[in-house]
Amino acid sequence: MKRWYFPVVALVLFAALIVAAVGENSLAAQGEPGSADDPLVAKSYVDKLTAVQVLELEAGETLRAEAGAEIILRAGKAVAETGPQGGIAAIT
C-alpha cells in the first residue's frame, strides 16, 4: 500500500464519522412521532375541526345546516325538515 493512501483513507473515515454523528443528532432532535415535538396533525387544525358554536334562535327563526352538521337542541322545541335525500338521525 502506498504511503499517501493512509491520510486519504483516514480523512474519508473521519468525514464519514462526522456526517453520521450530525445525522444522528438531527434525527434525535425531531422528537418521537405523535409527541408534542412532532405531532401527527397541527393542534390548530384539530381545534378548527372541533369548534363548538352556540346559537340562540328566537321563535320563528330558521337554522340551515350543511351535510354532516351536528345540531344539539339544549332547550325548547324545534321542527326538523330534510331535503330530498333525507338524513336526520335522532341520537337521544
Image (cartoon, rainbow, N blue to C red):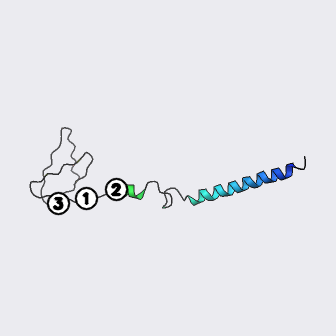
Which residue lies most toward the left here?
Answer: 60
CA distance separating discs 3 and 2: 21 Å
Local SS, label 2: helix
Task: Say which amino acid is labelled 1.
Answer: Gln
Local SS, label 3: loop
Crowd class of label 3 (few under 14; some 14 to 19; many from 20; radius 10 Å): few
55 displayed left or right of 11: left
Which residue sits at x=15%, y=48%? 80
Local SS, label 1: loop
Which residue sits at x=22%, y=53%? 71
**Vertical order, 2 against 58 (above or below):** above
Task: Say which amino acid is labelled 2.
Answer: Lys
Crowd class of label 1 (few under 14; some 14 to 19; many from 20; radius 10 Å): few
Q: Quadrant of residue 45?
A: bottom left
CA distance separating discs 2 and 1: 11 Å
Task: Say which amino acid is labelled 3.
Answer: Glu
**Which residue is the site of mark 1?**
53
**Vertical order, 56 against 90 (above or below):** below
- Number of the label disc, if any, that sits on residue 48: 2
Which one is nearer the viewer's eye here, 40 or 26? 26
CA distance separating discs 1 and 3: 10 Å
For the residues bearing labels 3 and 2, Cβ distance under 8 angstroms: no
Q: Number of callouts in the render?
A: 3
The location of residue 37, given as percent across then percent down, is 50, 61
* Mark 2 or 1, nearer chain start: 2
**Which residue is the site of mark 3?**
56
Which residue lies most toward the right here?
Answer: 2
The location of residue 77, given as percent across then percent down, is 12, 56
Crowd class of label 2 (few under 14; some 14 to 19; many from 20; radius 10 Å): few
